[in-house]
Amino acid sequence: MAVGLVWDERYLAHKSEGHPERPERLTAIRQGLEEAGLWKRLVRIQLYPATDEMLERVHSKEHIQLIKRDAGGKDLAHLDADTYAGPGSWDAALLAAGGVSAAADAVMKGQVRSAFCAVRPPGHHASRDRAMGFCLFSNVAVAARHVQAAHGIRRVLIVDWDVHHGNGTQDTFYRDGTVMYVSIHQSPLYPGTGAATETGEGPGAGRIRNFPLPPGAGDKEFLAALQEGLKAAEEFFRPQFVFISCGFDAHKDDPLGGLKRTDEGYAEGTRRVRAFADRFASGRLVSVLEGGYNLDALRRAASAHVAALLAP
């Protein structure tokens, strides 16, 4: 079966001069996919904006209204020291969360085997009441709740391999139990969360697995942590749907982190998560862009990742 792609020109309208989270990230990904002969092999998924109902499964009404206000004006708004919203940000943010959900729909309906969502703004730092770390809405969390509500999926696994810990995703599901979150990230690093001792509470106890890696860790350490996280998901959870919060800023050439993952490390990680999804989740897998700020590294690593999704 085919692999789907979420990519839309409207994501490029979210922009701030000189900011590392910039529209050129998506054009670099497209260039890489075209150069590798992968772009035309992907099935474009028709996306839709997330509704208030979808967003409110993860975010407060007050947060949604705040983003709408700050992203709906004519001027750029600074939500914190790192995070901005401008005239094109509201539509882009709705389409980012909705685009990931649309990809999940396509997988659930059997239209594609898996999907890669080149969306922005990213999402895994956004919490119930706060935009932070370049993120406005928690795209993967919204989509995880969507597959549960719209398709009856009971158990969802999120594998997050961004160089930064996804504090927003973790907070959303820390006491949940129906979503397991496995994060492999650099520590110490922003936002300062993601210790191995953070494992969930109540129904979510044991459903949070953090693997903080020291600066300089590379493919070997990443793959060992990934294997341990997937083993825990196999033994204690057995998900029916898998998401990847696919940050490419753990790449050795990325300026915002200090990990040393290579293009092949991303490809091998993809192969392992895909094999896991094939084994336990009927192949249901959606990968979602998070970080990645060196355009050349992003172009190469994203192509390696998508090629691994497309492999027979």
Image: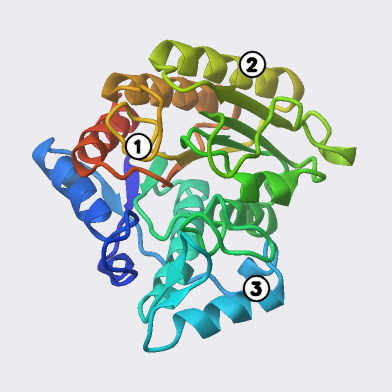
Q: Please, is residue 70 above or below residue 32 in the view?
A: below
x and y percent of residue 142 in the render? 60, 58
Residue ID for mark 1: 1
Indicate the secondary structure of the residue bearing disc 2: helix
* Quarter location, residue 229: top right
Mark 1, secondary structure of its residue: loop
Identified at 40% across, 45% down, the residue is 291
Of callouts 1 and 3, the N-terminal one: 1
* Other-residue count near label 2 (Cα within 10 Å), few / some / many at <14 / 14–19 / ≥20: some
Q: Which mark is residue 63?
A: 3
Residue 130 falls in image quadrant: bottom right
Residue 231, numbered label:
2
Taking 80 as reference, is 267 left or right? left
Q: Give the number of the mark in front: 1 or 3.
A: 3
Q: Nearer the viewer, residue 238 or 117?
A: 117
Q: Residue at x 25, y 45 (%)?
A: 42
- SS category of the residue bearing label 3: helix
Amino acid marked by disc 3: His
Vertical relation: 116 (above or below) 51: above
Q: Residue at x 37, y 19 (%)?
A: 268
Instruction: Report x, y in % for residue 92.
Output: 39, 70
Name the kind of residue labelled 2 in the image: Lys
| 51 horizontally vs 114: left or right | right
Q: Quadrant of the C terminus?
A: top left
Q: Are marks 2 and 1 in contact (CB under 8 Å)?
A: no
Horizontally, residue 142 falls left or right of residue 118, namely right
User: Marks 2/3: CA distance?
Assistant: 36 Å
Indicate which disc, 2 or 1, sits on the residue closer to the N terminus. 1
